[in-house]
Amino acid sequence: MGWLIFVVVVGGIVFLFGLAVRAGKKLSAKQEAYFVSMFPDLQPYYHPKNVLEFVRARLAQAPARSGMTVRSPPGFPAAHEAQVSFDMDKKGRERETWRLLDAAGQELSRFFFQTDEKDGMVRVGEGKFRVTRVASVKHVRYWHPDREFKWTPDAWKFVTRLSEDPIDSTDRGTSFSDSGSSSSSTSTAAAAAAAAAGVAAAGGTFDGGGASAAWDGSRSGSEGGTSTAGATSY
């Protein structure tokens, strides 16, 4: 009888583990569907884990001040290379511009990078990502006049102007917070996102894996005043 009880216990553990894995995959697909449906302007390049990888590499080492080209830019696997330049904005502040290019040299997207004492920031259109300088903290915040989110590898929180409560999406499921702060996402947006889950769950995700490494303009040649970094693994 002892061996029979052992088999039953092991079988039950395996069964529960399988249920947990399936539930985790279902939740992950729902979270990605929310992101894709609520933030179409960030597709397909600006998934928060990609932005996190880029900012970590950028904070580790700044590009050459004369401008340069970075091959296989960290966090952007779809880009063949990125061109970095520095100029001044309309208010006389220095601006660091990144242009993502495909293998044919066509521009895929562009963004601006900034820093302050706490964060590295990526500005895309009207929106802004913030990544803390603390390397051990893996969370990304995104703000836009109409909507925002907070992301960690295990959870999302989406906020838009359409409803009273933000949507919390974690490993325990998706729920509405009772916080009354700022503009937040509505059940209408949630329903739209849930409806999109079946067709959009695979969108907006990236590998983004591997350790981030810095680029080094001093190892590069110079052409037309712009340094070109050698191929680097990230």
Image (cartoon, rainbow, N blue to C red):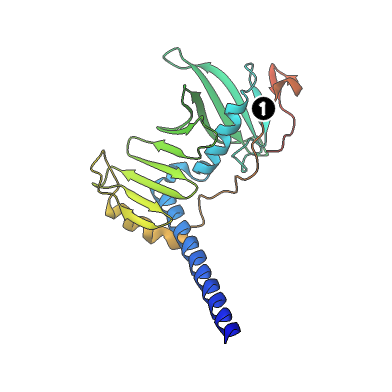
Asked if residue 234 lies left or right of residue 138, the reply is: right
Give how far across and how far down residue 112 sits, in percent: 50, 27
Q: How many marks?
A: 1
Above or below — where is 201 with respect to 79? Answer: below
Location of mark 1 (residue): 69
Q: Amino acid at mark 1?
A: Thr
Q: Which residue lies at the image location 42% right of the left edge and 37% below the top edge?
A: 141
User: In what element is the residue under mark 1?
Assistant: strand
The residue nearer to you, when weighing 21 against 86, is 21
- Quick one: label 1, few (<14), some, or many (20+) residues within 10 Å? many
Location of residue 35 with respect to 125 vertically, above or below: below
Residue 164 vs residue 136, the one in the foreground: 136
The quadrant in which the C terminus is found is top right
Q: Nearer the viewer, residue 23 or 218?
A: 23
Identify whether 194 is placed above or below 82: below
Outermost residue, bottom side:
1
- Residues 182 and 71: in front is 182
Q: Is 186 on the left-hand or right-hand side of 7?
A: left
Residue 19 can be seen, yes or no: yes
Residue 47 image offset from top left, x and y in percent: 50, 44
* Residue situated furthest front in the rendering: 2
Residue drawn at 41 percent across, 59 percent down? 196
Q: Is residue 193 left or right of residue 202?
A: left
Quadrant for the N terminus, please: bottom right
User: What residue sits 41% from the left and 48% below the top?
Assistant: 156
User: Which quadrant would residue 92 be assigned to in this image?
Assistant: top left
User: x and y percent of residue 73 in the render?
Assistant: 63, 35
**Place of residue 110 in the rendered image (x, y in percent of width and height, measured from the top left):** 53, 32
Q: Residue at x 41, y 42 (%)?
A: 150
Res 220 visible:
no
